Amino acid sequence: MNTRPLKTFSRPLFVFILTGFTGGCGILTPPAGTPTFTPLPSATFTPTPVTWENLASTPPMGWNSYNHFNCNISETLIKETADAMITSGMRAAGYQYVNIDDCWMASERNADGTLEPDPKKFPNGIKAVADYVHSKGLKLGIYLDRGTKTCGGFPGSYGYEVQDAGTIASWGIDYMKYDNCSPAPGSSLVTDYTTMSNALKATGRPIVFSMCSWGFPGSWVASGRIAHLWRTTSDIKDTWDSLMAIMDANSVSAAFAGPSHWNDPDMLEVGNGGLTDTEYRSHFTMWALMAAPLIAGNDLRTMSQATIDILTAPEVIAVNQDPLGIQGTLVGNIEGTKKPEVWSKILSGNNVRAVVLLNRSDQTADISIKWIDLGLPSGPASVRDLWLRTDLGAFENGYTATVPSHGVVLIRVASVGGDMPTVTPAP
Ligand code: GLA
């Protein structure tokens, strides 16, 4: 087990020191009878330092260029996307990372081995883009690869890990996706990702580390000391079958997820046009329930109001961002056929669950859940519909909803009287 202390990133600490009033210019004698105040003892307030462990304490939220734009990226696109993240309300809803994927580089490193951006796509360099994104209160992500070439054929970081980590840190990068193409002969996945993890930590800059090795890497990542998230599957497609297959595969490693170490079932396809809004609502719901990173993959500049409403649904996002960070899973022992499914995620509070009634079949279906199958006490529980943002009332023992084909009903279930922490009064 690695017992080395984890890096604490240096950043300016704002220390507020409260002291008693010590007087100004000249000495004033208070009139007789004026109450006197005993100065308070000095107190200090120190904000929580940013550490590797708390850098992604809830699943990261942002956008990535690949699903919609592939290699058609540019400084203009990234800046316009940052602007759209704000005007659409996504920043206010919690999204913060604007992530550049593959194909941002020039085809060769420069003479001293430093990575250079493609001068046509990024004529002012990456730091200028980072400065712009930061000026908007957002963060910038970038893409590298652990092999000799990226998946798009650009320079890989094998053998250049320390130099590349230093380069992206000097540009002000906040998030890095590390891909898995063209591994060097004789190299090992574990060594390559660990080497880059250490190189990132050594920069002293807090950079979220996103592993992309297309399958749960193994329990060696579960400590959260290697990466903040890891891709559990091959690339997502904008089809219903792809979403369902990825969801099932991502569930296998549910037990290994937690604050600052997340299973990543790949970026969202919401708004990319291959599915209905009902299906995209199901996609977003299931990614929220699985505590997956919510990385939008559509064109934020032109998206419809329906897409905005899905991506910014506050009570669905709250399920995803619940501080316990437990990945929701399929509930066993339910009645009904195989295709209508019930999934559940433990939320913070006493006896509180997010529950998805998911209809994978081709017909409308009634889907039921009993409280006992959620591990909740029998007796009444309050039910709230999190898409409709409506309280549905208290229900004895269970709940049934009619769910359209490829649709979901997402509810929050709280045992009545059981969702408030017990406070013991001081004697
Ligand atoms: C791989 C990754 C994708 C994307 C492309 C870029 O396929 O899994 O998410 O980054 O490479 O080339």
Image (tube, rainbow, N blue to C red):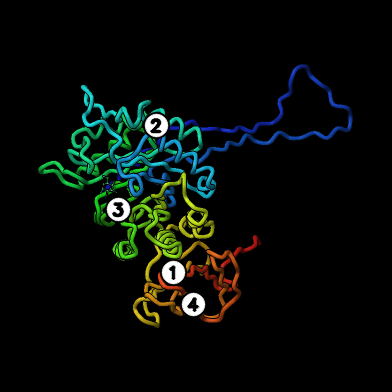
Task: Sort mark 2 into few (<14), some (14-19) or many (20+) by Cα contacts within 10 Å.
Answer: many
Q: Label 3, label 4: how many angstroms apart (C-alpha)?
A: 33 Å
**Residue bearing mark 1:** 407
Q: Which disc is residue 386 wearing?
A: none
At x 49% / y 44%, what residue is drawn? 85
Q: Left or right? Give the position of 338 relative to 14.
A: left
- Outermost residue on the top side: it is 26
Residue in view at x 31 percent, y 37 percent = 200
* Percent position of residue 86, x then y: 52, 42
Q: Secondary structure at mark 2?
A: loop
Amino acid marked by disc 1: Gly
Q: Residues within 10 Å of mark 4 (few under 14, many from 20)?
A: some
- Mark 3 element type: strand
According to the image, label 2 marks what residue? 172
Q: State how far apart marks 1 and 2 are (Cα).
A: 41 Å
The answer to which of marks 1 and 3 sits earlier in the sequence is 3
CA separation in Å, label 1 and label 4: 10 Å
Name which of mark 2 and mark 3 comes first in the sequence: 2
Residue 104 visible from this viewpoint: yes
Name the residue type under label 2.
Answer: Gly
Between the C-alphas of marks 4 and 2, the distance is 49 Å
Please give the label number shown on residue 402: 4
Callout 1 touching callout 4 (CB < 8 Å): no
Is the residue indicated by label 3 positioned so its CB lies within 8 Å of ligand 1? Answer: yes
Circle 3 is placed at which residue position? 231
Quadrant placement of the C terminus: bottom right
**Amino acid type of the residue tagged 4 in the rendering:** Thr
